[in-house]
Image (spheres, rainbow, N blue to C red):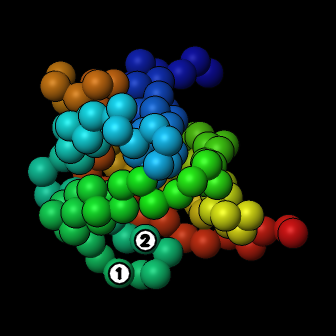
Amino acid sequence: MSESPLFIRARDEVVSLHEFFVAWYDKKTADAIDFDRFDKVMGPGIQMIPPSGDMLDRDAVVSYVRNNRATFDGDYAIEIADVQSAWEAGSAIVITYIEKQERRGVKTARRASALFVESSSAPNGVEWRHLHETWMQTAE
């Protein structure tokens, strides 16, 4: 089965947003990163459930990312894997993926599901509307 154009845009958004995070959070590259890229893809009413189980609204998500600029010193990396479509209808799609992080030598992994809707003003043509993450056990 071929990948839909909406899936391709959502997958590309997941990858490029996490590339943004790595650059935004690194002291060496943060000054060259435009925060508007992040702000444009966080759709109105977005909600995020991080592994802690908290429910974050758009303001909390945007503030958290903005306030953690340049908090790492070359010791933060993200890998995105296993991106799959879970549901798609019209201009909306739910995808799942695995996010592997390494922060100052500590490795973690989380499985995420994200709802995207089409948006002509977003860099990849989709904006985030809901994100739910849960911890995965990692082999060390």
Q: Report whether 82 appears left or right of 47.
A: right
- Label 1 – label 2 distance at C-alpha: 6 Å
Residue 84 point in image, percent of width and height: 57, 40
Residue drawn 39% across the image and 42% down it: 30
Residue 60 point in image, percent of width and height: 22, 68
Specify whether residue 26 is in view.
Answer: yes
Q: Report whether 77 appears left or right of 52.
A: right
Specify whether residue 109 is in view.
Answer: no
Residue drawn 64% across the image and 54% down it: 75
**Quarter of the rendering occupied by the C terminus:** bottom right
Check disc 2 and report the residue beneath it: 50
Q: Nearer the viewer, residue 14 or 94?
A: 14
Residue drawn 23% across the image and 29% down it: 122
CB atoms of marks 1 and 2 within 8 Å: yes
Residue 4 point in image, percent of width and height: 46, 21
Q: Nearer the viewer, residue 100 or 74?
A: 74
Q: Amino acid at mark 1?
A: Asp
Q: Nearer the viewer, residue 42 or 37?
A: 37
Seen in the picture, residue 117 relative to 45 is either above or below; the reply is above
- What crowding class fits label 1: few (fewer than 14 Cα within 10 Å), some (14-19), or many (20 or more)? few
Seen in the picture, residue 120 relative to 43 is either above or below; the reply is above
Seen in the picture, residue 140 relative to 9 is either above or below; the reply is below
Which residue is the extreme one toward the right? 140
SS at mark 1 in the image: loop
Numbered marks: total: 2
Check disc 1 and report the residue beneath it: 54
Badge number at residue 118: none
SS at mark 2 in the image: loop
Q: Amino acid at mark 2?
A: Pro
Which residue is the extreme one toward the left? 44
